[in-house]
Amino acid sequence: MLFPNLPIKTAGGKVFWDTLDRRNGWKLQQNLFTGHFRILDPDDVRQAWGTDESEMWRTFRNFTGSRSE
């Protein structure tokens, strides 16, 4: 499930976040404690977040223009 998002500037995930993929400056990250996911744009602004990993990967591919893998 994706949750409503307020585009918030972040520190880029240097603490508490595992970067699962990075493409065209975008990052898909997972929180080390809660397990939820977020997508950051090239300026480290959160553009989406949620708990459903497959939905987050699909959204990440849409943001980055990547094809399904």
Image (tube, rainbow, N blue to C red):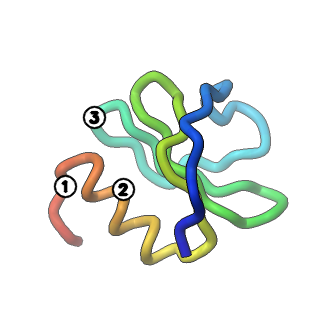
Q: Which mark is residue 24?
A: 3
Ranked by sequence position, the earlier of labels 1 and 3 is 3
Left or right position of 28 against 15: left
Depth check: 17 or 39 in front? 39
Q: Which mark is residue 27?
A: none
Q: Secondary structure at mark 3?
A: loop
Q: Where residue 49 appears, x then y in whole percent?
A: 57, 56
- Type of amino acid at the residue the image marks with label 2: Phe
Question: In percent of the image, x 67 and y 25: which residue is there?
Answer: 11
Please tell me whether residue 20 is drawn above or below residue 9 in the rendered image: below
Residue carrying label 1: 66
Residue carrying label 2: 60
Q: Residues within 10 Å of mark 2 (few under 14, many from 20)?
A: many
Q: Where residue 62 appears, x then y in whole percent?
A: 25, 57
Left or right position of 49 against 11: left
Q: Where residue 59 appears, x then y in whole percent?
A: 36, 61
Comparing marks 3 and 2, which lies closer to the viewer? 2
- Type of amino acid at the residue the image marks with label 1: Ser
| Number of on-image labels | 3
- Type of amino acid at the residue the image marks with label 3: Asn
Question: In percent of the image, x 40 and y 27: which residue is there?
Answer: 42
Q: The C terminus is located in which quarter?
A: bottom left
Please tell me whether residue 7 is drawn above or below residue 3 in the rendered image: above
